[in-house]
Image (cartoon, rainbow, N blue to C red):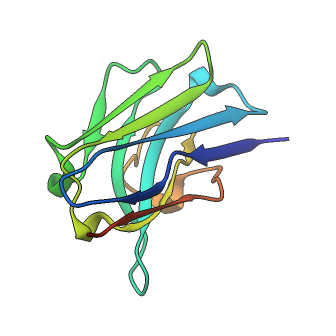
Amino acid sequence: QVQLVESGGGLVQPGGSLRLSCAASGFTFSSYTMGWFRQAPGKEREFVAGVNYNGESTYYKYAVEGRFTISRDNAKNTVSLQMNILKPVDKAVYYCPALENPGGVRCGRKYDYWGQGTQVTVSS
């Protein structure tokens, strides 16, 4: 049974930091590209960051580049998103999906498995 469990969300002030984590099980984690997507109220889901199967290639939404860092630990079957200098526009539910076919890392429809998400709120 495939499981993706996101954690680490919460309330943070603008300029603050959060570290999201995602624990994966039930599939060959080290063979999958992993991503982070987010969905704000009333908006479409959007790509935030992605990392290839061995962690050597990373991809970012332009608006988060330089503030967010994605990483993975294949020994622990986890993927993380370090978020710094958070802004109110970063408020959303964050998801960490898994993608078997490495093409289309920025396209949510191509991902095979999704977790339930974790809420991030940036507010003073």
Res. 25 image quadrant:
top right
Left/right placement of residue 46 relative to residue 9 reads left
* Nearer the observer, 65 or 9: 9
Res. 29 image quadrant:
top right
Residue at (55, 51) in percent of width and height: 111
* Nearer the observer, 104 or 61: 61
Left/right placement of residue 116 relative to residue 54 reads right
Residue at (55, 42) in percent of width and height: 99
Whether 55 is drawn above or below 7: the answer is: above
Whether 32 is drawn above or below 47: the answer is: above
Farthest right residue in view: 1
Left/right placement of residue 10 relative to residue 122 reads right
Res. 58 image quadrant:
top left
Specify the quadrant that holds the C terminus. bottom left
Farthest top residue in view: 75
Count of numbered circles in the view: 0
Q: Residue 66: image x %, image y %?
A: 13, 40
Q: Residue 49: image x %, image y %?
A: 34, 45
Q: Residue 12: image x %, image y %?
A: 34, 57
Residue at (18, 43) in percent of width and height: 67
Q: Residue 22: image x %, image y %?
A: 57, 39
Whether 1 is drawn above or below 45: the answer is: above
Farthest bottom residue in view: 42
Could one spot residue 79 in this view of the protein? yes
Could one spot residue 100 in this view of the protein? no
Specify the quadrant that holds the N terminus. top right
